[in-house]
Image (cartoon, helix red, strand yellow):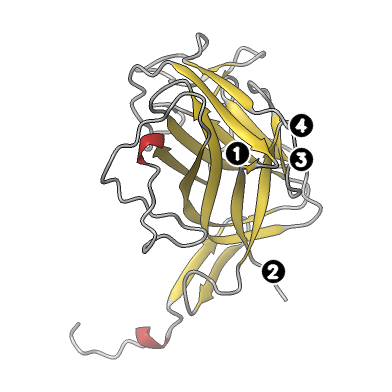
């Protein structure tokens, strides 16, 4: 600003901190070399976490006839607002943010997986309510878990605000204008595209990728990104069959 040549203009335009790896520099953002891969939601048990469903994430597209995952709310086990919100006691008597919500977890990774960039969640949803919320959290579950997990990133959207701006949306980064409400009709299945905040992380071999889904969160576990729950009552279905392939789009970066 003072006309002093500090050399800053000779440095790379983008500096990125990659979890589990460290700092990297790039010339542009998003990274042109990132290749998007889809992780599909599945009702098959992952045997990975104590949750309402313990569903799985798969690199394979879903089959025909797979049953949707049902989510009734509010749960009587939730700790309420103010308090732990959707947090509830697990079978060990400990407060757990995942114990009474919906989760989908991948198999252990066969090799390191690096993601850098925007993430999108395309969720096929139906509900008994005229409106509902989708609150998503993304985790790495280490091969040897020590202590509580912290989300790598998260995203949320009110279903009635699902409309997209086609000019500003990108294939893996939806843009919602939030200029109108479109209530849901009971029994109808809607595609909901949720922007998940961009992140940079290297998942280690043997770890798992986990997606948590609910219509609420926790003033304790999710502070300062938590939301007021209000008076939502109903049932949501997360569809993940061949006609409704709900999935995460992850920006995978492969090193030479």
Q: Which residue is identified by label 2? A: 254
Q: Secondary structure at mark 1?
A: strand
The residue pinned by badge 1 equals 211
- Residue at 41 percent across and 15 percent down: it is 80
Mark 1, mark 3: which one is toward the viewer?
A: 3
Q: In this rendering, would 51 be left or right of 78? A: right
Q: Residue furthest top?
A: 76
Tag 3 residue: 63
Query: Which quarter of the rendering shows the C terminus?
Result: bottom right
Q: Residue at x 55, y 74 (%)?
A: 32
Q: CA distance from mark 1 to mark 2?
A: 22 Å
CB contact under 8 Å: marks 1 and 2: no
Mark 1 or mark 2, earlier in chain: 1
Q: How many neighbours does mark 4 have within 10 angstroms: few (below 14), some (14-19), or many (20 or more)? A: some
Give yes or no for contact between labels 1 and 3 (Cβ–Cβ under 8 Å). Answer: no
Q: CA distance from mark 4 to mark 3?
A: 11 Å
Disc 1 versus disc 3: distance between alpha carbons? Answer: 20 Å
Q: Name the mark nearer the viewer: 3 or 2.
A: 3
Q: Are the two marked residues, 4 and 1, in contact with CB atoms closer than 8 angstroms?
A: no
Residue 49 lies, with reference to residue 152, above or below; the image says above
The vertical placement of 72 against 39, above or below, is: above
Give the left or right position of residue 66, taking residue 138 as reference: right
């Amino acid at each position: 600003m003072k006309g002093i040549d500090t050399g800053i203009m000779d440095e790379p335009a983008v500096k990125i901190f990659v979890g589990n790896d460290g700092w990297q520099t790039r010339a542009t953002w998003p990274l042109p070399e990132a290749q998007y891969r889809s992780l599909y939601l599945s009702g098959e048990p992952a045997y990975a976490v104590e949750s309402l469903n313990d569903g799985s994430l798969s690199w394979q597209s879903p089959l025909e006839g797979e049953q949707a995952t049902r989510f009734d709310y509010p749960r009587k086990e939730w700790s309420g607002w103010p308090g732990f919100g959707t947090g509830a006691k697990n079978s060990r008597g400990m407060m757990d943010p995942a114990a009474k919500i919906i989760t989908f977890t991948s198999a252990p990774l066969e090799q390191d997986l690096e993601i850098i960039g925007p993430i999108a969640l395309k969720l096929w949803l139906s509900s008994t309510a005229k409106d509902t919320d989708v609150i998503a959290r993304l985790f790495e579950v280490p091969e040897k878990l020590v202590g509580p997990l912290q989300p790598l990133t998260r995203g949320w959207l009110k279903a009635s605000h699902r409309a997209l701006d086609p000019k500003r949306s990108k294939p893996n980064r939806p843009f919602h204008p939030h200029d109108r409400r479109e209530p849901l009709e009971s029994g109808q299945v809607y595609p909901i595209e949720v922007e998940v905040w961009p992140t940079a992380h290297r998942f280690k071999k043997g770890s798992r990728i986990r997606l948590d889904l609910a219509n609420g969160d926790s003033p304790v576990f999710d502070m300062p990104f938590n939301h007021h729950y209000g008076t939502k009552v109903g049932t949501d279905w997360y569809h993940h069959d061949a006609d409704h392939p709900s999935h995460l789009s992850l920006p995978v970066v492969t090193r030479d």
